[in-house]
Amino acid sequence: MLVGDTDLPVALETQSLAVVPRDDLLGDRVDAERDLVHELTHHWTGDSVAVRRWSDLWLSEGHARYYERLYSDEHGGAALESVMRAAYEQHDQWRHDEGAPAEPTDATLFKVMRYDGSALVLFALREKVGEETFGRIERAWVTAYRGRAAGTRDFIALASRVAGEDLGPFLRPWLYGAHTPPMPGHPDWQVDPVED
């Protein structure tokens, strides 16, 4: 990691180095650490396991945001479930504005759907298969595809193998559908209406 005195508006990961603007580290301790966790996660998802095509960007940014939020939850920041519920409420709007997580329609890919919207997909998968199986899927992902490019179909196939069940029918609506599916284990969660 390189902390730079730079005008970059955001931190940036590259193949072998994450560049973090100095000002990112001057705020609240949990927020600063959360930003570092995001960039460090990219060393595995995005760098070691590169995205096959731009539509697979959700695999890189979604993982980085998910682990950033998980870290925050475990270190006194916002609760993961609360953050995911808020993302769930907005998910249909993001789909409308930017496309589904693995099927972007907006010309600018680096929008909220690729981050919070994609982290929500991983949270939904964890809720579906359980924390232990989700952990095995995550470890298998960064092990099986280390040093290679992989895509959405690869992730669905690997997750299905590790979980011992075909997760395609569950994940495809989350990744490609026009509307947000129900959140496993949270029947009370509701998606806000879409505004044009």
Image: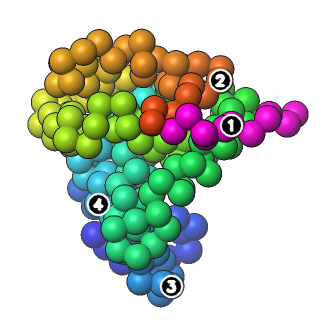
Q: Amino acid at mark 3?
A: Gly
In the displayed structure image, the side of residue 105 where residue 176 appears, left or right: left
Q: Amino acid at mark 2?
A: His
Which of labels 3 and 1 is toward the front?
1
Furthest residue in direction bottom, as rendered: 26
Q: Is residue 13 above or below residue 146?
A: below
Secondary structure beneath disc 4?
helix
Q: Which residue is mark 4?
A: 40
Q: Which mark is residue 179?
A: 2
Q: Is residue 45 above or below residue 145?
A: below
Q: Earlier in the sequence, mark 3 or mark 4?
A: 3
From mark 3 to mark 1, how far is it between C-alphas?
Answer: 32 Å
Q: Is residue 20 visible?
A: no
The part of the chain drawn in magenta is 186-196
In contact (CB < 8 Å): disc 2 and disc 4:
no
Residue 194 colored in magenta in the image: yes
Q: Earlier in the sequence, mark 4 or mark 1?
A: 4
At a point 30% along the width and 25% down the height, the residue shown is: 155
Residue 133: x %, y % from top left:
20, 35
Q: Which mark is residue 169?
A: none
Question: What sort of colour scheme is used for the picture?
Answer: rainbow
Secondary structure beneath disc 2?
loop
At a point 41% along the width and 83% down the height, the residue shown is: 29
Furthest residue in direction right, as rendered: 196
Q: Out of 81 and 34, give the one closest to the viewer.
A: 81
Q: Amino acid at mark 1?
A: Val
Quarter of the image that includes the N terminus: bottom left
Q: Which mark is residue 191?
A: 1
Q: Earlier in the sequence, mark 2 or mark 4?
A: 4
**Dot 4 crowding, Cα within 10 Å, few <14, some 14–19, many 20+:** some
From mark 4 to mark 1, how far is it between C-alphas?
Answer: 31 Å
